[in-house]
Image (cartoon, rainbow, N blue to C red):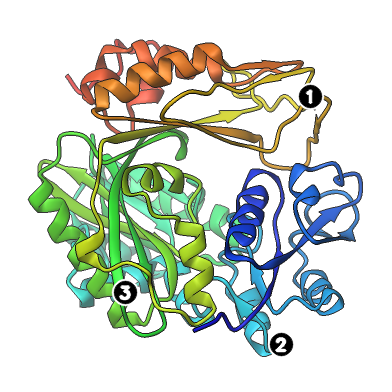
């Protein structure tokens, strides 16, 4: 069997565009790179077979413009589009436009992206599939506050009000008591309308010290699906992940395997295709679904490191009509992997620090992987995400991986800009991180000087 396309348009930039271009090379596919004005010095553009300017500087009229992306595909003869992550990767309207144009989106069908993008609908589908969810409202909170209070009383306090179309921590408010509910709903609804043009809210029980656990899945068009590994993404600031690892330390492997099987069943039930991630909160031995990401995740390399499976290549293969190249029985987890997201930010205040890279010395050695589009002389523009590198290490055990990460961070040199490297170096020495005695609030507590940030 052969793929149904031979040319892939990479609708992204930076390190993920470089990652996709490399996967296309391995699969023997031609690739097309996009770039905005004054953004034509990226590394992946040297790897693709053709590059095309898509529009003015900044994402609004280039990487985020659906019509321009489709026009670029038509002009270059690309039959498939890989959106990477960010930008248009979870835009259901874009996915539908790709399908309507007779092209292949390297991702799930538009209907699934739309359903999982609506947190209320995603929650409803997961409950129907038997995936564990937090106690919460079954639908959107009504405008009538008396009715909203009745529904929230049934959920129980503390609870969290969330935007149905939200993400990144926007449109969310923690509500400790009924007296706080009115103001929380009003503020969250206004924020949701402004950010997502969707004021629908729902409520679910608020967990005080959960971990953030993910399950990576792959599915093909024939109804086959597998789960690859779990990941712990609890080290985050303002709902933005800074460090991820696989597998999650200290969890029951039996419980994780059962959760993985539930995620596979949910994929098969909805007709999922491609790579996806089920995200959960974990507290007191229980997993609770929070959302599904219908795209490639930034943190996919840690799963690749412990399974040996090329997730991006599998994404492309199943989009092109081929079956998964692995069965569930062939998926094994070996050792432990950690990824540090290196951002061009002040490591204390997290303010973006764009500028020109004057020195770039990535680390190396056994078990060390660097995903980055940097090179000496590259100027990091202010208009895009501040992620500039992902440093990933693999060790036989978690302690081995921590030691290897500490050495790799010490070896890495990035000059001319500020980065979050010092923060990651600090984390490798923290007792709570070393013992995995952390929750999603760990880093915020640590940065605020609240002890060592542990759950003790």
Q: Are marks 3 and 1 in contact (CB under 8 Å)?
A: no
What mark, if any, has residue 96 been given in the picture?
none
Q: Residues within 10 Å of mark 3 (few under 14, many from 20)?
A: many
Q: Nearer the viewer, residue 402 or 163?
A: 402
Nearer the camera: disc 2 or disc 1: 1
Q: Residue 14 in the image: x percent, y percent?
A: 70, 45
Task: Reply above or below: 217 against 126.
Answer: above
Identify which residue is drawn at 45% across, 44% down.
301
Identify which residue is drawn at 24% across, 46% down.
333
Residue of label 3: 267
User: What kind of element bears circle 2?
Assistant: loop
Disc nearer the start of the sequence (3/1): 3
Say which quarter of the image contains residue 2.
Answer: bottom right
Disc nearer the start of the sequence (2/1): 2
Disc 3/disc 1 C-alpha distance (Å):
43 Å
Q: Residue 358 in the image: x percent, y percent?
A: 79, 17
Please count the marks in the image.
3
Identify which residue is drawn at 66% across, 27% down.
344
Disc nearer the start of the sequence (2/3): 2
Disc 2/disc 1 C-alpha distance (Å):
40 Å
């Amino acid at each position: 069997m052969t793929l149904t396309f031979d040319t892939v348009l990479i609708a992204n930039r930076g390190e993920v565009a470089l990652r996709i271009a490399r996967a296309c090379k391995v699969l023997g596919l031609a690739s097309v790179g996009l770039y905005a004005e004054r953004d034509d010095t990226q590394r992946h553009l040297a790897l693709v077979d053709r590059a095309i300017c898509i529009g003015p500087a900044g994402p609004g009229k280039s990487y985020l413009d659906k019509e321009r992306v489709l026009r670029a595909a038509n002009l270059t003869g690309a039959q498939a589009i890989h959106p990477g992550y960010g930008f248009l990767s979870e835009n259901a309207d874009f996915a539908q436009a790709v399908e309507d144009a007779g092209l292949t989106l390297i991702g799930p069908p538009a209907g699934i992206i739309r359903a999982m993008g609506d947190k209320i609908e995603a929650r409803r589908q997961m409950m129907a599939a038997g995936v564990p969810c937090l106690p919460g409202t079954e639908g959107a909170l009504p405008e009538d506050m008396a009715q909203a209070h009745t529904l929230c009383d049934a959920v129980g306090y503390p609870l969290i009000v969330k935007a149905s179309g939200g993400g990144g921590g926007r449109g969310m408010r923690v509500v400790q008591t009924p007296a706080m509910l009115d103001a929380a709903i009003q503020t969250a609804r206004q924020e949701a309308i402004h950010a997502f043009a969707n004021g629908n809210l729902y409520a679910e029980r608020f967990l005080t010290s959960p971990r953030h656990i993910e399950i990576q899945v792959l599915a093909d068009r024939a109804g086959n699906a597998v789960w690859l590994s779990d990941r712990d993404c609890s080290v985050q600031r303002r709902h933005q992940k800074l460090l991820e690892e696989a597998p999650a330390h200290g969890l029951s492997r039996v419980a994780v395997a059962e959760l993985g099987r539930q995620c596979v069943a949910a994929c098969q039930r909805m007709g999922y295709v491609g790579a996806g991630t089920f995200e959960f909160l974990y507290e007191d031995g229980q997993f609770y679904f929070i959302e599904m990401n219908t795209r490639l995740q930034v943190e996919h390399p840690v799963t690749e490191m412990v399974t040996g499976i090329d997730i991006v290549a599998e994404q492309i293969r199943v989009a092109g009509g081929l079956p998964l190249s692995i069965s569930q029985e062939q998926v094994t987890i070996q050792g432990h992997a950690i990824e540090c997201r290196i951002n061009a930010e002040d490591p204390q205040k997290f303010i973006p620090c764009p500028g020109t890279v004057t020195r770039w010395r990535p680390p190396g050695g056994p078990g060390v992987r660097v995903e980055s589009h940097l090179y000496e002389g590259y100027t990091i523009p202010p208009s895009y995400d501040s992620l500039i590198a992902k440093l990933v290490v693999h060790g036989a055990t978690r302690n081995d991986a921590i030691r290897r990460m500490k050495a790799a961070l010490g070896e890495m040199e990035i000059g001319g800009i500020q980065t979050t490297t010092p923060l990651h170096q600090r984390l490798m020495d923290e007792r709570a991180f070393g013992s995995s005695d952390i929750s999603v609030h760990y880093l915020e507590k640590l940065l605020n000087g609240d002890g060592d940030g542990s759950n003790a």
